[in-house]
Image (cartoon, coloured by chain):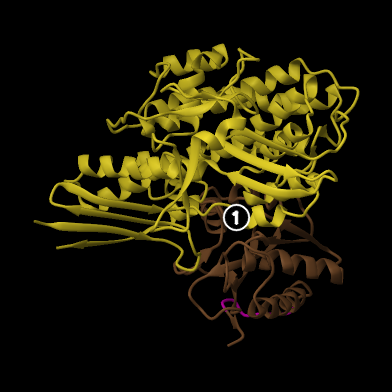
Chain colours: A brown, B yellow
């Protein structure tokens, strides 16, 4: 996969055949439908090492992924990776061990993190084999689309904020 | 009498994945129950009623790490059903594509998942603090494997260029130049990788395994990727089409998973160690010499040393990829022609983790009437349980923390497909 350096890189991560794990991809597809000048939107069904390759030369990156932390399904989280640690209770879904958390951790050690890296995480409800998102996650996908568009257009969103309360 | 229970839970909300339960009484292991993998029944159902030509792209979605293996087993099974033979340069290109996947998958496992176990780190992040250059080498090698899959597969993840009969598009010879340079670097890095893994500390542990892998008589110089008979070190020697006569999937009470067994014989072992032990003399001279220099003989029975064997296979894959590229001549057609008819076909190919069996029944129009998929992790589950039972008994005096660590390491010897299950293990140990 080529190394990419657009003004802003949006990466949705997941597997659409693992139910709510497809949330990140669904956000990407919705953003593409709306059209998003200045941003490159990439759907990634890859392991973390590929993620590190994709963001290598990017300055501003937003990742969107499903998460399983035990919170209410559909809850939305935002993390500024340079300012906050991701809670240990978070398990980003991955079919293999080297996923988002590992990519961020390793890139931090090797000094390969993009200078601006935001993660939007959606609490999933069902990660079993199958297609289609849970209703709660479907709603969260729409909210994240709006949040990401606001963020890219320069709106000030406080780090660590959780929606909806 | 003391009773100790090791219970491992993982992602609680991922049903059917990831749990280990070991019960110890005194110095005896009373019970081992492993639940790490659910077979792809959803995909088998999804395939029924779809056209045969859709299958390679659907099965590629089963695994983000080994999509090529799923595609290769799919197309070879379809071709067997339709009486299609893919030879010459198209066959070579399929081997090349598989080289890319072995490099990607094995490198990820050796460097990012398994090496930290041996070096005493909880994960590769901590290992990278002390060994940044080694971790960077692993990342660079994996990237070279990705480059093969992207180049031939048309896409890095879930390649789209593979079809029944061959490929949608094949490259011109001169297009390989840039790729070849990356692979030459990769071959040198793979040599270093074998030497590096050979120096790791290994527990003294062997069992009387039945190793099962492909071995082809039609191509006696080839280490197996896409074809061959299914053979074992204990006399099994059958055509792939007889797989279901000799192997069975058993329901296991503690798990949603099915455990594969050799009928009337029990657990068996698939993957790098099995391939190596049954095909050592078919590795390239460079791979054989490097293995011997690293202290491996033609047979290795210690599953902890699978990290060295995987590294030898990475070296072989780089070497084989370069051999294929050097001898490549662009074929006249990207795929062979064939006609549709009803039929049943099956195939096994050597996924990075071991043999991957597919069977399809097609209608006259090419509709999939029935599909069966048996991944390597399903096949290894029973032998992993057996390893844990014997290993824990030998290591029973270790601290709970150490024992837990070594159980995880023993599971990772097999690079189980749901590696996350063994990575996010949470253990509860109870003592009486």
Label 1's element? helix
Q: Is residue A30 left or right of residue B397?
A: right
Q: Residue at x 75, y 48 (%)?
A: B368
Q: Quadrant of residue B380?
A: top left
Is B158 placed above or below A74 here?
A: above
Is B317 placed above or below A7 here?
A: above
Question: Considering depth in this image, is B238 or B410 the residue closer to the camera?
Answer: B238
Tell me the chief SS of the magenta region: loop
Q: Is residue A29 left or right of residue B195?
A: right
Q: Quadrant of the C terminus of chain B?
A: bottom left
Q: Which residues are magenta?
A: A155-160
Question: Considering depth in this image, is B79 or B303 the residue closer to the camera?
Answer: B79
Percent of width and height locating residue B72: 69, 36
Please say whether residue B268 is visible from this viewpoint.
yes
Q: Residue at x 68, y 53 (%)?
A: A55
Q: Quadrant of the N terminus of chain B?
A: bottom left
The crowd level at tag 1 (other Cα within 10 Å; few <14, some 14-19, many 20+) is some
Question: Mark 1 highlights which residue?
Answer: B41
């Amino acid at each position: 996969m080529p190394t990419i350096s657009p003004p802003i890189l949006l990466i949705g991560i997941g597997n659409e055949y693992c139910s709510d794990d497809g949330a990140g991809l669904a956000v990407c597809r919705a953003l593409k439908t709306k059209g998003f000048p200045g941003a490159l939107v990439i759907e990634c069904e890859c392991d973390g090492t590929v993620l590190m390759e994709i963001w290598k030369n990017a300055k501003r990156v937003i990742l969107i992924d499903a998460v399983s932390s035990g919170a209410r399904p559909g809850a939305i989280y935002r993390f500024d990776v340079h300012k906050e640690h991701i809670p240990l209770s978070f398990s980003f879904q991955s079919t293999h061990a080297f996923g988002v958390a590992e990519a961020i951790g390793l890139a931090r050690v090797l000094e390969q993190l993009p200078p601006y890296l935001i993660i939007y995480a959606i609490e999933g409800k069902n990660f079993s084999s199958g297609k289609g998102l849970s209703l709660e996650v479907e709603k969260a996908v729409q909210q994240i689309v709006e949040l990401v568009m606001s963020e890219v257009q320069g709106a000030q969103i406080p780090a660590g904020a959780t929606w909806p309360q | 009498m003391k009773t100790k229970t090791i219970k491992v839970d993982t992602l609680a909300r991922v049903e059917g994945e990831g749990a280990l339960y070991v019960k110890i009484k005194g110095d005896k292991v009373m019970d081992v129950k492993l639940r790490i993998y659910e077979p792809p029944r959803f995909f088998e159902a999804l395939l029924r009623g779809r056209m045969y030509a859709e299958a390679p792209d659907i099965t590629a979605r089963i695994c983000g790490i080994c999509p090529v293996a799923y595609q290769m087993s799919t197309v070879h099974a379809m071709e067997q059903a339709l009486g299609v033979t893919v030879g010459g340069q198209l066959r070579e290109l399929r081997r090349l594509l598989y080289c890319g996947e072995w490099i990607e998958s094995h490198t990820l496992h050796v460097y990012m998942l398994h090496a930290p176990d041996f070096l005493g780190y909880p994960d590769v992040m901590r290992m990278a603090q002390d060994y940044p250059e080694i971790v960077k080498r692993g990342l660079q090698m994996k990237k070279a494997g990705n480059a093969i899959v992207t180049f031939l597969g048309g896409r890095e993840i879930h390649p789209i260029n593979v079809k029944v009969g061959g490929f949608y598009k094949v490259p011109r010879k001169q297009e390989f130049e840039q790729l070849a340079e990356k692979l030459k670097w990769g071959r040198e890095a793979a040599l270093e990788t074998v030497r590096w893994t050979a120096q790791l500390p290994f527990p003294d542990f062997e069992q009387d395994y039945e190793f099962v892998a492909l071995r082809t008589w039609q191509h006696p110089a080839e280490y197996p990727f896409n074809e061959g008979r299914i053979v074992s070190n204990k006399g099994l020697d059958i055509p792939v089409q007889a797989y279901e006569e000799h192997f069975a999937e058993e329901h296991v009470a503690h798990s949603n998973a099915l455990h594969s067994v050799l009928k009337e014989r029990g657990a068996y072992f698939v993957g790098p160690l099995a391939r190596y032990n049954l095909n050592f003399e078919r590795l390239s001279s460079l791979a054989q010499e490097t293995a011997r220099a690293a202290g491996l003989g033609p047979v290795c029975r210690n599953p902890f040393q699978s990290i060295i064997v995987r590294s030898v296979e990475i070296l072989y894959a780089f070497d084989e990829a370069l051999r294929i590229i050097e001898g490549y001549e662009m074929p006249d057609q990207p795929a062979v022609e064939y006609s549709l008819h009803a039929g049943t076909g099956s195939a096994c190919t050597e996924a990075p983790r071991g043999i991957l069996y597919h069977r399809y029944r097609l209608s006259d129009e090419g509709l999939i009437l029935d599909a069966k998929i048996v991944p390597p992790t399903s096949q290894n589950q029973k032998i992993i349980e057996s390893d844990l039972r014997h290993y824990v008994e030998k290591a029973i005096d270790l601290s709970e923390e150490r024992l837990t660590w070594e159980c995880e390491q023993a599971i990772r010897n097999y690079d189980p497909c749901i590696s996350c299950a063994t990575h996010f293990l949470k253990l509860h140990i109870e003592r009486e």
